[in-house]
Image: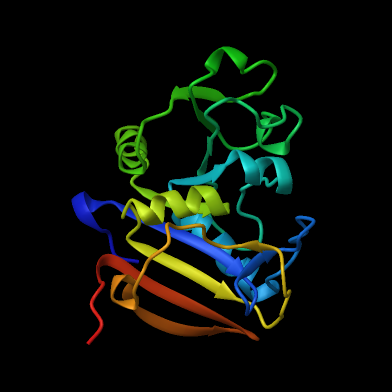
């Protein structure tokens, strides 16, 4: 990985089916990606100073956000939770793992969550500024749909690692929720490097200065 602007790097990651789903209509997502894809995710965590998820991911998936499948340090865990709605009993708040920060506008509702509340900045770029000021210069945005889409729409990601699993779900939760466009000329046309991950494919998408033009 190569650092982006100001010696910083923001990477988004998403594991999805061939038809762009990250979960079934009932929210089941364990596991869309196989062992190779999950190892790659843990490798990204080990390379990151901080990993970001939204309250929806904490609530639905109860992730630990630790490095277990490869060797490496655990990142700081960052939850974007404006109204402090993530259930306090989730693993990320147990206090027995790496440090957890909650970006929120409702710090008074922290309760029994064993985490450090921080004032939620207004934009994804300002979130990255806040994390960099606290020593986290390589940041992994792990999900879910709303959080990753906000960072992508804001142009705050340098790269996107899209892991595509060989299955068709047919309906369910999409990976992205972005504003509609009217013409294909408005579509993103980033450079993409394709890599095999066992039976899956990894799209390493370069977003810094991506090209929106259609030749």
Q: Residue furthest top?
A: 108
Q: Looking at the image, is 139 positioned above or below residue 213?
A: above
| Residue located 68% across and 71% down the image | 33
Residue 197: x and y, percent?
58, 81
What x and y, as percent, mark residue 96?
69, 32
Near-viewer residue (68 or 123): 123
Residue extending farthest to the left is: 6
Quick check: 96 left or right of 194?
right
Kindly tell me whether residue 104 is visible in this rendering.
yes
Decide if residue 138 is on the left or right side of residue 12.
left
Say which quarter of the image contains residue 180: bottom left
Report the number of discs. Answer: 0
Q: Where does residue 174 sit, x and y in percent of width and height? A: 61, 63
Q: Quadrant of residue 109?
A: top right
Seen at 48% across and 84% down, the residue is 195
Rendered-image quadrant of the C terminus: bottom left
Quarter containing the N terminus: bottom left
Q: Is 63 on the left-hand or right-hand side of 207?
A: right
Q: Is 81 located above or below residue 147 in the figure? A: above
Relative to residue 45, is residue 69 drawn left or right? right
Residue at image location 56% in from the left, 73% down from the top: 163
Position of residue 150 measured from the top left corner of the image (x, y, whole percent): 43, 49
Considering every residue shown, the one lying at the far front of the view is 182
Rendered residue at 64%/23% (across/down): 114
Is residue 141 in view? no
């Amino acid at each position: 990985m190569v650092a982006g602007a100001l010696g910083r790097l923001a990477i988004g990651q998403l594991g999805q089916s061939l038809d762009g789903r990250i979960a079934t209509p009932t929210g089941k997502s364990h596991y869309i990606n196989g062992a190779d894809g999950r190892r790659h995710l843990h490798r990204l965590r080990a390379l990151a100073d901080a990993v970001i998820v939204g309250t929806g991911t904490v609530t639905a998936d109860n992730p630990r956000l630790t490095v277990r499948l490869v060797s490496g340090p655990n990142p700081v865990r960052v939850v974007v939770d404006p109204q402090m709605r993530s259930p306090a009993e989730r693993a990320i708040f147990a206090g027995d793992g790496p440090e957890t920060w909650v970006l929120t506008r409702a710090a008074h509702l922290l309760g029994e969550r064993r985490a450090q509340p921080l004032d939620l900045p207004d934009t994804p770029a300002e979130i990255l500024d806040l994390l960099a000021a606290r020593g986290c210069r390589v940041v992994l945005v792990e999900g879910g749909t709303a959080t990753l889409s906000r960072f992508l729409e804001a142009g705050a990601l340098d790269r996107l690692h899209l892991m595509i699993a060989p299955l068709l779900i047919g309906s369910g939760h999409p990976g992205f929720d972005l504003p509609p466009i009217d013409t294909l000329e408005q579509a993103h046309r980033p450079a993409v490097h394709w890599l095999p991950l066992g039976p899956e494919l990894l799209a390493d998408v370069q977003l810094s200065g991506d090209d929106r033009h259609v030749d």
